[in-house]
Image: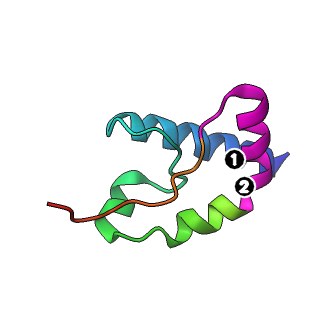
Amino acid sequence: MIYTLSYIGLRNRGLRQMETYDNVGILYTDVESTFQRQDLTVHQLLTALYAPLNHLDRKFFGGEHPIDCILFDLS
């Protein structure tokens, strides 16, 4: 139950925060701190951890896929 609720909480926060950037996808970590650190390590760990729930979310509810890559500092 905790596993599922934590996924839902992180997914909803990620979707809300990514709307600001007009991106499609989920970022499981805080967007601002991730951009500041320019590090996706924690997000990638959470992506692997929540892969089964994300698969079910996408298959049955039309959920978003986790973001695979962000190209930082492009000008």
Where are the magenta residues, as a range?
49-64
Look at the picture and state if 30 lies above or below 18: below
Look at the image and name its color scheme. rainbow
Look at the picture and state if 17 lies above or below 50: above
Q: Say if the magenta span includes residue 34.
A: no
Q: Amino acid at mark 2?
A: Tyr
Q: In 3D space, how far apart are the residues under numbered discs 2 and 1 (Cα atoms)?
A: 7 Å
Look at the picture and state if 44 lies above or below 4: below
- Image quadrant in which the N terminus is located: top right
Query: Which residue is pictured at 77% across the width and 46% down the height?
Result: 53
The dominant secondary structure in magenta is helix
Front residue of 12/55: it is: 55
| Left or right: 15 in relation to 22 | right
Which mark's residue is nearer the viewer, 2 or 1?
Answer: 2
Q: Say if the magenta span includes residue 52.
A: yes
Percent x, y of residue 28: 55, 53
- Image quadrant in which the C terminus is located: bottom left
Is label 2 in contact with label 1 (beta carbons under 8 Å)?
A: yes
Residue 7's disc number: 1
Front residue of 18/32: it is: 18
Percent x, y of residue 60: 79, 29
Q: Amino acid at mark 1?
A: Tyr
- Determine crowd level at label 1: few under 14, some 14-19, many 20+ residues with C-alpha closer than 10 A: many
Residue 50's disc number: 2
Percent x, y of residue 37: 34, 70
| Element on which disc 2 rests | loop
The answer to which image quadrant residue 74 occupies is bottom left
Query: Which residue is pictured at 71% across the width and 36% down the height?
Result: 58
| Left or right: 38 in relation to 40 | left
- Determine crowd level at label 2: few under 14, some 14-19, many 20+ residues with C-alpha closer than 10 A: some
